Image (cartoon, grey):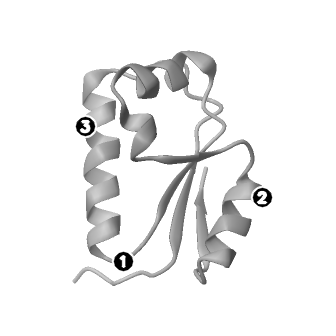
Amino acid sequence: LETERAGAVILELSGLEHLDSTAVGVLVGGLKRFEAQGRRFFLVNPRERVASVFRITHLDSIFRTFPTVEAAIEAAKQAGEEATSGH
């Protein structure tokens, strides 16, 4: 049985050096799955190389990105959600 979770999902990306098409697909799939559950999916602190992939693919327009985990948590609180951090 899959347990249902609630709250925002925060993915801290500072340790990620490269983003290939498979990883982009996983992130988009995650975004769709979380949004279908009524949850927000926030990305935090991507390196420039990773951020450029989001810009080139125009995914920067669908993913909310924050400079720090604290900023993402604050955005989740303002949206009335409890944040769940994934490091």
> What amino acid type should be assigned to the residue bearing mark 1?
Gly
Element at badge 2? helix
> What amino acid type should be assigned to the residue bearing mark 3?
Gly
> What amino acid type should be assigned to the residue bearing mark 2?
Glu
Image quarter hosting the N terminus: bottom left
Query: As drawn, is 9 to the left or to the right of 47?
Result: left
For this rendering, which residue is in front, 72 or 84?
72
User: Residue at image x 27%, y 63%?
Assistant: 33
How far apart are labels 1 and 3 at the CA level?
A: 20 Å
Query: As drawn, is 77 to the left or to the right of 13?
Result: right
How far apart are labels 2 and 3 at the CA level?
A: 26 Å
Quadrant of the rendered image containing residue 79: bottom right
Element at badge 3? helix
Element at badge 1? loop
Quadrant of the rendered image containing residue 25: top left
Q: Which residue is mark 1?
A: 38
User: Is the Cβ of the residue at disc 2 closer than 8 Å to that at disc 3?
Assistant: no
User: Residue at image x 33%, y 21%?
Assistant: 20
Q: Earlier in the sequence, mark 2 or mark 3?
A: 3
Q: Which residue is mark 2?
A: 70
- Give above or below for 67 relative to 54: below
Q: Which residue is mark 3?
A: 25
User: Residue at image x 55%, y 27%?
Assistant: 16
Picture coordinates of residue 66, whole percent (x, y): 66, 46
For this rendering, which residue is in front, 67 or 55?
55
How far apart are labels 2 and 1 at the CA level?
A: 21 Å
Picture coordinates of residue 73, whole percent (x, y): 69, 65
